[in-house]
Image (tube, grey):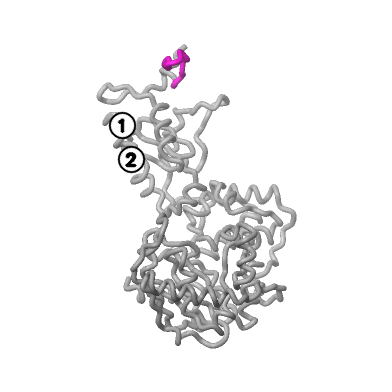
Amino acid sequence: TGDLGYLDKKGYLRITGRKKEIIVLPNGKNINPVELEFKLEKLSPCIKEVGVLMYQNLLHAVILPDFKTLTDLDVQDLEHYFRENVMSIYNKEVSSYKRIMQFTLIKEELPRTRLGKIQRYKLESLIVKPTREGKSVEHPDTDEYRVVKNFIESQVDMDISPDDHIEFDIALDSLGKLSLIDFIERTFGVTIEEDKLLKFPSVKEMVEHIREKKRWFNTEHLSWADGLKDKVSVKLPRTWATQNMIRCFAKGFFSVYFSLKGKGVEEIPEGPCIFAPNHQSYLDALFVSAFLKRKVIRRTYFYAKKKHVNNKFLEFMANKNNVIVMDVKKDLMESIQKLAEVLKSGNKIVIFPEGTRTKTGDLGEFKKTFAILSKELNIPVVPVSVKGAFKAFPQGARFPRPCTKIEINFLKPITPEGHTTDTLVDAVKQSISRSLGE
């Protein structure tokens, strides 16, 4: 029949490919590409599909990445990740003649027959593609595409292509993606969850989905400035005596267990402000609050993602200890409006700009939420450097390491005057970076 296969230990015939698909190397060795594709897909969850072919006398892999998995792993440089974490590992595990020396990352599914078999003669056309620079791009001639394109370009200050991927070509950060989701919902009445947004291989296909699902077309939606002017009803968590008890216990216990020290508390201004600490460990919020005076801690609220407050007990404790739980994936504007109401009421808020703990000990990317609030409400930001917490309690550690020196430094407040949102983010990050000695 032309099929290739083998008999397993139970006597079943396992089909592994077709004889005509066999790749004959220059040294005469025969390669079954299906075998190599299976090994690659099994090796990494970041590979959604892969096709192997001979190209320019070398084995070449055409890979469709799983963009959702890559996002969950916080991969920033795709080429580097696949080179070092996939291909390098694969090549160490196989015979020398089965090593794949080149690969191409694509955004569309591999060409297949009606029976689901890879059309291998079409794989080479996926390798040879024009570069982004200098290429002529034909943009869809629709109002929906133009509106979405203009919005995205206003967020990233670059020209986009209809074939660009939202994250890996345009490099929208977390707030940028949520802003786009909010914009699409307000403009077209289409709700797109963040994980679904990342599954669209291109802006063009995302807009096609919007055109099919849209319920209206309204370009007179709110800007950040307009949205923060609106009055929003916010029921603030109650301040129980447990909050001060937790603060006092944390300061005493951690001072002994970790050699915890703090300075710069005198820099904290009267009235509303935003504390912006870097994020090194699970305990950072307790480290920061340990040095706030009682009258300050009573008027200080902590922002937490709903996914981290995921049971009744945590919800109860959050509601009694000044923790505001937000679900930014459902309504970004409403979440930021609620934080704005807290600040307009004369309170203080702690927001970790990185959004998640560092994996390396270095400062991560700073999100813009705190800067938007500061800029639009004219409220100062107090950078807070957390030093030593990563060494004491890094990701993956079960228990914190005792006797580790941890230092919390409240830095000089930064006012938003003269800053754009982006320059304010940079100023806060640089202040913390200097304090950490980076």
* Residue 42 horizontal/vertical position (percent): 43, 35
* Residue 367 horizontal/vertical position (percent): 50, 66
Residue 38 appears anywhere in the view: yes
Q: Name above or below for residue 134 compared with residue 61.
A: below
Q: Which residues are magenta?
A: 6-17
Q: Residues within 10 Å of mark 2 (few under 14, many from 20)?
A: some
Q: Nearer the viewer, residue 138 or 211?
A: 211
User: Mark number for residue 94?
Assistant: 1
Q: Residue at x 37, y 60 (%)?
A: 360
Q: Identify the amino acid type marked 2.
A: Ile
Q: Name above or below for residue 153 compared with residue 206.
A: below
* Residue 46 horizontal/vertical position (percent): 45, 43
User: Mark number for residue 181?
Assistant: none
Q: Badge 2 is on which residue? A: 89
Q: Residues within 10 Å of mark 1 (few under 14, many from 20)?
A: few
- The image quadrant of residue 431 is bottom left
Magenta stretch encompasses residue 13: yes
Q: CA distance from mark 2 to mark 1?
A: 9 Å
Q: Residue at x 51, y 86 (%)?
A: 269
SS under mark 2: helix
Looking at this view, name the residue that lies furthest to the left.
Answer: 27
